[in-house]
Image: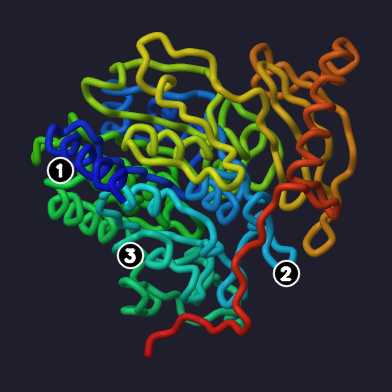
């Protein structure tokens, strides 16, 4: 008890001195590696992100843990691989959760929002959730004081252009209530942005964590009147340019309120770009839903004036699971110690003038329940290629080695030239299989997802 009081006093003193940063995570849906100016886009106009990059740091080897939404989001919020928390695939053997699934993010998990809320932060989730639509799985049950958004993908309603409709009308939630059905998606980025700015204004005197998870540019893409039809890349480009505008509004609000020097803003994507809808992941191979770099390696910007060196960049490997322990370290909060957390504190990678080597020996590419690859240093070994189609996906064993430093586009398999590297990475893969499992093989350190006995669907009542 006394220790807690001392901790609280230290926290209050640190907060008063402005030493504890606010956190804003802008998590874009399906945005490609090269869809924004700082990562090479010449197609999309992204002046606000260009400015954000010039004032902050680019991470060019930042990975999410899955090439699709649900498992990637599970990792961001738990600091753990999707398979670790049982959300590598849905109960029905699908890539992601669908409306009315009985499964979701377990209440036994300690989320990033809970970690920060425990340290006195105000917390808000705005946008797409996609970690379960049953009441126990909603953001408000996972550490977010407020929620406003569409709780899963925007094609899981009546805009799927596939009749008969498989799902109820697309719900827009405030807290846990459906306040609109089939909201006008042209306005969704704008509404999220206004909501985000309001939260920042209301929380400016306290430390806060804003998780802004855009619905766009996931298919079907929409933009408001100011952006619709204005880009040179169709609806995809329109929605990306509106997200750039939105980011500018957030940064302006921080500046106007004079809190940008105590706010760390992260901008990244939940998975690689959906190329068939207009995304670019150049120079990476593949995209959303594939096990190539284009599925997992995403654009990443960090801005914190005075702390993150302006206009800098690092190619050291970092992972989305690192966000939780990093924010915890910066906030003086603690990471759960009674379970395996895969993430590591990457504050030095973000803040040091001369960034140290990344903290991970290996990154594991999982596709649904299957281990498909491992990266260590400059090397990436593909150990399986996914074949077939839902519901009969198979992982076909392979051993293809790519030197990501010399061949970022994974075009030359060099497995024959480097048998010892192959062997070393195969041993790392085997360690992951023991720990996390692979396909039907169960891992030793995995935790179950949340489950409800009977599912209902979200509708207005
Ligand atoms: Mg996505």
Q: Label 1, label 2: how many angstroms apart (C-alpha)?
A: 43 Å
User: From this viewpoint, is residue 230 visible?
Assistant: no
Left or right: residue 304 versus residue 130 is left
Residue 140 quadrant: bottom left
Marks 1 and 2 close (CB-CB < 8 Å): no
> Residue at position x 51%, y 75% from top?
134
Disc 1 crowd, CA 10 A, few/some/many (<14, 14-19, 20+)? some
Q: Is residue 333 left or right of residue 194?
A: right
Which residue shows up at 53% across the image and 28% down it?
A: 318
Give the mark nearer the N terminus: 3 vs 1.
3
Give the number of marks: 3
Q: Secondary structure at mark 1?
A: helix
Mark 2 close to ligand 1, CB under 8 Å: no
* Mark pair 2, 3: CA separation: 27 Å
Q: Is residue 335 visible?
A: yes
Residue 374 position within the rendered picture, expressed as x and y whole percent measured from the top left: 73, 30
Q: Give the quadrant of the C terminus.
A: bottom left
Callout 3 crowding tier (Cα within 10 Å): few <14, some 14–19, many ≥20: many
Single out the mark in the foreground, 3 or 1. Answer: 3
Residue bearing mark 2:
92
* Front position in the image: 11 or 99: 11
| Residue 440 coordinates in the image, percent (x, y) | 85, 55
What's the residue at 74%, 45% (across, down)?
A: 436
Q: Earlier in the sequence, mark 2 or mark 3?
A: 2
Residue underneath mark 1: 253
Category of crowding for the residue at label 2, using alpha-carbon neighbours closer than 10 angstroms: few (below 14), some (14–19), many (at least 20) = few
Residue 147 got which mark? 3
Give the percent coordinates (x, y) of residue 409: 67, 23
Q: Between marks 3 and 1, how big is the CA–CA gap? A: 20 Å
Instruction: Give the image location of residue 161, x and y in percent.
Output: 55, 72
């Amino acid at each position: 008890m006394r220790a807690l009081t001392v901790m609280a006093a230290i926290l209050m003193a640190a907060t008063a001195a402005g030493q504890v940063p606010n956190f804003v995570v802008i998590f874009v849906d399906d945005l490609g590696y090269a869809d924004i100016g700082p990562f090479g886009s010449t197609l999309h106009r992204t002046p606000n992100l260009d400015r954000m990059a010039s004032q902050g740091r680019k991470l060019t080897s930042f990975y999410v843990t899955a090439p699709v939404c649900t498992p990637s989001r599970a990792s961001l919020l738990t600091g753990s691989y999707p398979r670790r928390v049982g959300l590598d695939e849905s109960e029905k053997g699908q890539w992601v959760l669908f409306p009315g699934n009985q499964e979701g993010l377990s209440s036994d998990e300690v989320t990033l929002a809970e970690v920060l809320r425990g340290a006195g932060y105000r917390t808000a989730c705005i946008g797409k959730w996609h970690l379960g639509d049953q009441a126990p799985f909603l953001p408000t049950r996972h550490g977010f004081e407020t929620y406003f958004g569409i709780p899963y993908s925007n094609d899981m309603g009546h805009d799927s252009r596939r009749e008969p409709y498989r799902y109820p009308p697309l719900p827009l939630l405030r807290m846990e209530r459906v306040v609109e059905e089939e909201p006008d998606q042209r306005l969704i980025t704008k509404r999220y942005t206004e909501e985000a700015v309001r939260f920042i204004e209301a929380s400016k005197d306290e430390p806060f964590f804003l998780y802004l998870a855009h619905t766009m540019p996931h298919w079907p893409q929409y933009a408001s009147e100011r952006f619709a039809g204005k880009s040179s890349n169709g609806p995809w480009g329109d929605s990306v340019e509106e997200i750039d505008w939105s980011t500018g509004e957030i940064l302006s609000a921080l500046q106007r309120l004079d809190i940008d020097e105590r706010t760390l803003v992260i901008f990244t994507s939940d998975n690689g770009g959906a190329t068939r809808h207009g995304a670019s992941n150049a120079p990476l191979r593949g995209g959303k839903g594939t096990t190539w770099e284009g599925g997992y390696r995403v654009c990443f910007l960090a801005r914190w004036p005075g702390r993150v060196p302006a206009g800098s960049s690092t190619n050291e490997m970092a992972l989305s699971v690192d966000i939780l322990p990093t924010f915890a370290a910066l906030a003086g909060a603690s990471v759960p110690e009674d379970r395996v957390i895969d993430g590591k504190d990457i504050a030095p990678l973000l803040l040091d003038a001369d960034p140290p080597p990344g903290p991970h020996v290996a990154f594991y590419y999982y596709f649904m329940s299957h281990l498909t690859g491992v990266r260590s240093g400059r090397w990436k070994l593909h150990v399986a290629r996914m074949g077939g189609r839902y519901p009969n996906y198979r992982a076909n064993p392979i051993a293809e080695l790519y030197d990501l430093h010399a061949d970022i586009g994974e075009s030359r398999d060099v497995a024959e030239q480097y048998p010892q590297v192959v062997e070393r990475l195969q041993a790392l893969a085997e360690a992951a299989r023991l720990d996390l499992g692979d396909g039907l093989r169960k891992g030793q350190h995995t935790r179950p997802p949340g489950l409800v006995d009977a599912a209902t669907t979200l509708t207005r009542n």
